[in-house]
Image (spheres, helix red, strand yellow):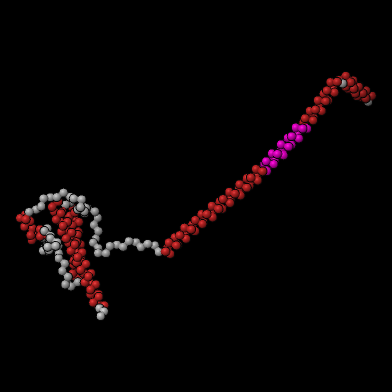
Amino acid sequence: MSSSPSSNGLSNNTLHLEQIQTNLASLRNGILELEAVSRTAGGSHSQVEAVKLLRKQYERMRGMLLADSQGVEVPSLDIIVAPTPNKPDPFSSLTSPSNASLAPLIGTPPPRSPSPSIPDYNGPFTPYTDDPQRPPSPPSPNALLQTQKQLIDTQDTHLSALSDSISRHHNLSLQINSELDTHHGLLQELDTELDQTEGRLSGARRRLDRVGRGLKGNGSTVCIGVLILVLLVLIIAFKT
C-alpha cells in the first residue's frame, strides 16, 4: 500500500526540522565553548564582538524557526540545558547569569595558552548556512565548441595575414633578383665596350708609333716638302 503525498511531505519536513535542530544545537554548543575559552584565556575585543554577533545570529535563527514551526523546542543561549551522559557540557552551567555566583565555588580552571587547534576568530565573520555554495558548473559542450571555433577562426585570420606577407616578400625578392640580373647585363656590356675601346686605342697607338718612326727616318725630305709648300704660297700671294 503506497503512502500519500501528504505523509511524504510531512516526513520530509520532519527530517528537515531535525537537521535544523541538530545544526542549531551544534552552533549553540560552539558559541558556549567559544565564550568559555574567551573568558578563561582573556579574549581580545574582536573575539568578544564575534561572540556577540554569533549570539545575535543564533537568536535570530531560533526566532525564525519558532515562528515557522509549532512544537519545536530550540533552547536559548541564556537557558541552561542539562548535560546528557553522551555529551557532557560542564561549562554551560557557568555561563548562565543565574549561576554566576556559583562559579567561584566550583573553581575556575587556570588560564590556558592558545593552542593551534583553537581557530582564529579575528577574521571576517561569515553567516551560518545549512546549504554550502555549489561549485560553478563546467561550461557546456556548445560553449566549448564555440570557443574552439573562435580560436580556429582567429588562427586562420593570422595565418592568412602571414601568407599574404610571405607572398609580398616573395614578389619583392623576385623583383630584386630581376633588377640584379639587369645590372649584371649592363656591367657585362660595359666591360665589352671597354675592351673594344682599349683595342681601338692600342691600334691608334701603333699607327702613331709608325708615323713617328717614319718622320724620324724621312725628316729632311719632309722639311724640303714643307719649304716648297711655303714658297708656293708666298709666290701666289705676291702675284695676286
Using the rendered view, name the quadrant where residue 191 is placed. top right
Quadrant that contains the C terminus: top right
What is the total number of numbered labels drawn onto the structure image?
A: 0
Against 36, residue 9 (above or below) is below
> Looking at the image, which residue sits at the far top?
220
Compared across the picture, whether 230 is left or right of 142 comes to right
Residue 11 spot, x, y in % from top left: 23, 73
Residue at 17% over, 50% down: 114
Compared across the picture, whether 161 is left or right of 229 comes to left
Residue 126 spot, x, y in % from top left: 25, 58
Residue at 14% over, 55% down: 36
Q: Was residue 195 drawn as part of the magenta stretch in this picture?
A: yes
Using the rendered view, name the quadrant where residue 29 is placed. bottom left
> Looking at the image, which residue sits at the far left?
105
Q: Relative to the observer, which residue lies in front, 16 or 72?
A: 16
In the rendered structure, which segment of residues is drawn in magenta? 182-200
Residue at 54% over, 52% down: 162
**Residue 223 visible in rendering:** no
Residue at 15% over, 59% down: 32
